[in-house]
Image (cartoon, rainbow, N blue to C red):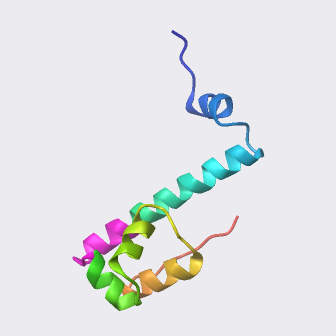
């Protein structure tokens, strides 16, 4: 059995950086991380998805989708963190 570094495995299985497949993969992975961060922030504030949805003006199902890394936009992120009284810092490389 041959072992590979994660980066090498990603290159072989998903595609090299710069390809459409790899860009899609990296984007989806980033969205999952953002969704998980939103979920943890909500839990630290002892809020349910329903409560956060009411504060933001969306259904609980929308909060669930965002926490799963779907439908994440900068606008949604700002609204969610503002509703939880959190400051966010966005760095653009």
17 displayed left or right of 85 = right
Q: Residue at x 26, y 78 (%)?
A: 45
Q: Position of residue 22 (x, y in %)?
A: 68, 44
13 displayed left or right of 69 = right
Picture quadrant of residue 44? bottom left
Picture quadrant of residue 43? bottom left
Picture quadrant of residue 52? bottom left
Looking at the rendered image, the quarter that the C terminus falls into is: bottom right
Which residue, as the protein is rendered here, is positioned at the far top?
A: 1
Asked if 82 appears above or below 15 in the picture, the reply is below
42 displayed left or right of 21 = left
Which residue, as the protein is rendered here, is positioned at the far left?
A: 46
Query: Bounds of the magenta span?
Result: 38-48
Q: Position of residue 31 (x, y in %)?
A: 53, 60
Asked if 58 appears above or below 49 in the picture, the reply is below
Q: Residue at x 57, y 54 (%)?
A: 28
Secondary structure mainly formed by the magenta segment? helix
Q: Position of residue 49 (x, y in %)?
A: 29, 76
Residue 40 on the magenta span: yes
Q: Residue at x 66, y 51 (%)?
A: 24
Q: Disc count in the image?
A: 0
Q: In front here: 21 or 41?
A: 21
Q: Residue at x 63, y 31 (%)?
A: 13
Asked if 90 appears above or below 23 in the picture, the reply is below
Which residue, as the protein is rendered here, is positioned at the far right?
A: 18
Residue 16 on the magenta span: no
């Amino acid at each position: 059995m041959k072992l590979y570094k994660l980066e090498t495995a990603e290159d072989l299985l998903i595609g090299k950086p710069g390809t459409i497949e790899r860009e899609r993969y990296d984007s989806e992975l980033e969205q999952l991380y953002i969704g998980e961060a939103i979920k943890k922030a909500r839990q630290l504030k002892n809020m349910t998805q329903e409560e956060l949805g009411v504060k933001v003006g969306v259904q609980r199902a929308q909060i669930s989708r965002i926490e799963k890394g779907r439908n994440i936009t900068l606008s949604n992120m700002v609204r969610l963190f503002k509703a939880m009284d959190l400051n966010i810092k966005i760095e653009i490389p």
